[in-house]
Amino acid sequence: AYADYRHADSLGLRVGRAKIPLGLYNESRDIDIARPQIFLPEAVYLNRWRDSITAYDGAQVYGNTLLGPAGELSYQTYLGTLALEPDGAVAQTIEEEMGLVAEELEVEAVYGLALGWTPPLSGLRVSTTWMRIATLDAAGAAPGGARFAYTVDDLDAVFLGAEYTWGAWTFAAEYMRWGFDAVLAVHSPMGSQRRNEAIDRAGWYVSAAYECCDRLTLFAVYDELYRDIHDRDGSDVDPARGWVDHQMYHKEICAGLRYDVNDHWIVKGEVHAIHGSAAVYELENDGQTPEEDWYFFALKTTVVF
């Protein structure tokens, strides 16, 4: 819930829990009727992190202004915090990638800026967003009865994207890059160990959707995700972590359809062919290393009142 006061088109204030403006679609990702796909592209929207980057608690200043012949510009800037759970995506990532069980998670602050430009070209919109998670601290249990402290210093995420609607066609493309520096300290009766690491990840996608008629839409998506933008093929993967090369990348083709049975009932179906397993964790596969090439199918129906 939130309170919203709009002084003018160019200036508004929102206080409470609000969606984080990331990319073209993060604010509308829970509105199933807003898009033809069941899943937003994994390479940019990181569906497994959905519980952590969907909303924040804080305040936001927003507005939009006309730019004359250059179109219209909208902005959102916000400051707040994230509620991270010990069984959520951040804790699962720490366990998967480092073998550590996070029992406490705390974020000092989250803030960012989102700009949207609607140029004079009808059907086109352009988006750029930046988010910073300022200091994320995690603590908990490590193997052998040890304890750990993991500190992420200023996680930065940048999204660039554009959407163009032309007649019955809708095209979209986005690029995402996020990274941070972190320090891991493990303390045990035998002594303490400290390790620094730098993370630099990136992903992108292109998509096309065609509205065949009032009720049927066909779509296709291609996306790529890299756990380390400097090691796209996994040739430098750390064997000490027990990983293989294909756990460093994710390349996916998706095709599907949306059928509006009526104004209140929607049916969607899609198939995904995936090369690489960067988006799949061993924790979700009974501790087994995922296959390099795999497929999945999804079917969803939604009733809107």
Image (cartoon, rainbow, N blue to C red):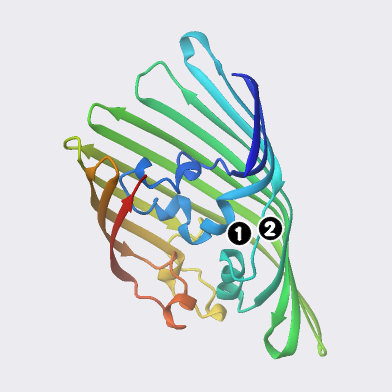
> With 91 as the anchor, is 231 left or right in this view?
left
> With 286 as the anchor, is 98 left or right in this view?
right
Q: Amino acid at mark 1?
A: Ile
Residue indicated by mark 2:
181
Outermost residue on the front side: it is: 305
Outermost residue on the top side: it is: 68
Image vertical order of residue 210 relative to residue 134, above or below? above
* SS at circle 2: strand
Q: Position of residue 211 (x, y in %)?
A: 21, 37
The C terminus, quarter of image? top left
In the picture, the disc for residue 199 is 1
Image vertical order of residue 160 relative to residue 45, above or below? above
Residue found at x 67% / y 86%: 143
Image vertical order of residue 175 relative to residue 6, above or below? below
Residue found at x 61% / y 32%: 76
Count of marks overlaid on the render: 2
Q: Nearer the viewer, residue 139 or 227?
A: 139
> With 81 as the anchor, is 246 left or right in this view?
left
* SS at circle 1: strand
In the picture, the disc for residue 259 is none
Q: Nearer the viewer, residue 31 or 202?
A: 31
Q: CA distance from mark 2 to mark 1?
A: 6 Å
Disc 2: CA contacts within 10 A as few (<14), some (14-19) or many (>=20): some
Q: Amino acid at mark 2?
A: Asp
Q: Position of residue 101 (x, y in %)?
A: 65, 77
Image marks 2 and 1: residues in contact by CB distance under 8 Å = yes
Q: Position of residue 119 (x, y in %)?
A: 43, 19
Where on the picture, by quarter, is residue 286? bottom left
Residue found at x 45% / y 49%: 30
The N terminus, quarter of image? top right
Mark with earlier residue (2, 1): 2
